[in-house]
Image: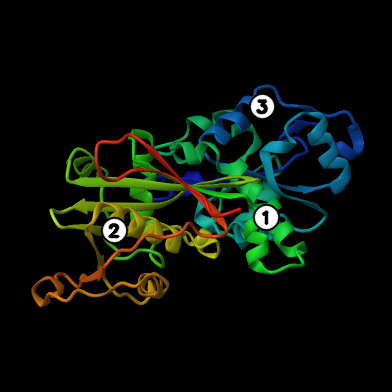
Amino acid sequence: MTTEARQPTEARPTIKCLVWDLDNTLWRGTLVEDGEVVLHEGLREVITALDSRGILQAVASRNDHDHAWARLEKLGIAEYFVLPHINWGAKSASVRAIAEELNFALSTIAFIDDQPAERAEVEFHLPEVRCYPAEEALGLPGRPEFTPAVVTGDARRRRQMYQAGVRREAERTEHTGTDEEFLRSLGLELRIERAGDEAISRVEELTLRTSQMNATGVHYSDQALRALMADEEHEVLVASLVDRFGPHGAIGVILLERRPASWHIKLLATSCRVVSFGVGAALLRWLSDEAARAGVLLTAGFRRTERNRMMEVAYRFAGFREHPDDAVAAEQDGVQTLALEPARQDAPAHLDVRAPRLFGDSPELLQWAHAQ
């Protein structure tokens, strides 16, 4: 009996990573005995379908690593697997290590193996992990736990972004210069765009999941975000980051209300994984530059929490202070109003910015690049 049979899927989260056994699960036969193993019919399509939904795939197999990985490469599917744990240790140890390296909850991990004893060993040590027998592999894409409600562009690129991140961190570890020199070497480009239909789900996710780099902690639903997009007095802006290793995906959101004499940042949130790239500060510098061009005051909502100290530091470092008008500055629902007299800004030294103009009728796209 599988874990799925014991516990209903409705109350459990969507699978974020599927860990594959190899022998007699992914391919027919046993590599050390049969040598020229081949994929089970239809599994290539399963692998690509899950990958297109943003579900990462890893390996936990009792085999010689080099031999097994070479076979995956020959079969043309090695690129689809992150964190291959191919060794002679316990499968539960490999599955746990994969979850920890991905920073995924065990309840979002699945494991598939042809051997009941191997599944039982994983279930015993990691009861939150959902286990499946190999004969159910072809049906996995049809199961609700492998079917995310929304598949964003970032989700479709999740594996590539993860793999780019591994290469990026490896180079950071090997870099012998300063952090500033390393950042300059990345060729970072921050892209700011008005949110469209495809980006809106990622924007909602950022408002929900980001806490350390969320200025107010307010969650905006899909419906609320679409209402703001349709309002001429509001801008819903999504920021993405790319470098020479590849895209980081959508990493920030700005909800901006354009008042007669001021622009008000209702929400600024960025992903914690790009804190070291100075994205929050770069967004505030860009907003200050645009507000200065438009000749308006820049204000921002901020709610202090136990987790968003870094965002408060970013606002203070950018020059925001309590609003001088006590009536405006009065806290409502714990949200304080900060204000900045904006000034023209130079682009950050370590990245370039592509962004729309936020005032006037010009369709001009701002190319805000640092001096070379």
Q: Residues within 10 Å of mark 2 (few under 14, many from 20)?
A: many
Circle 1 — which element?
Answer: helix
Taking the spot 87% from the left edge, 48% from the top edge, the residue there is 64
Tell me which amino acid carries mark 2.
Leu
Circle 2 — which element?
Answer: strand
Seen in the image, is 184 located left or right of residue 277? Answer: right
Classify residue 136 by image quadrant: top right
Front disc: 3 or 1? 1
Judge whether residue 121 can be spotted in this image.
no
User: How far apart are labels 3 and 1 at the CA level?
Assistant: 37 Å
Q: Which residue is mark 3?
A: 44
User: How far apart are labels 1 and 2 at the CA level?
Assistant: 31 Å
User: How far apart are labels 2 and 3 at the CA level?
Assistant: 43 Å
Query: Number of numbered discs present?
Result: 3
Q: Earlier in the sequence, mark 3 or mark 1?
A: 3
- Name the residue furthest left: 327
Q: Nearer the viewer, residue 305 or 143?
A: 305
Seen in the image, is 46 located left or right of residue 208? Answer: right
Rendered view: 295 above or below 30? below
Image quarter hosting the N terminus? top right
Q: Nearer the viewer, residue 354 or 237?
A: 354
Taking the spot 38% from the left edge, 39% from the top edge, the residue there is 199
Q: Earlier in the sequence, mark 1 or mark 2?
A: 1
- Name the residue furthest top: 41
Task: Tell me the number on the disc at residue 185.
Answer: 1
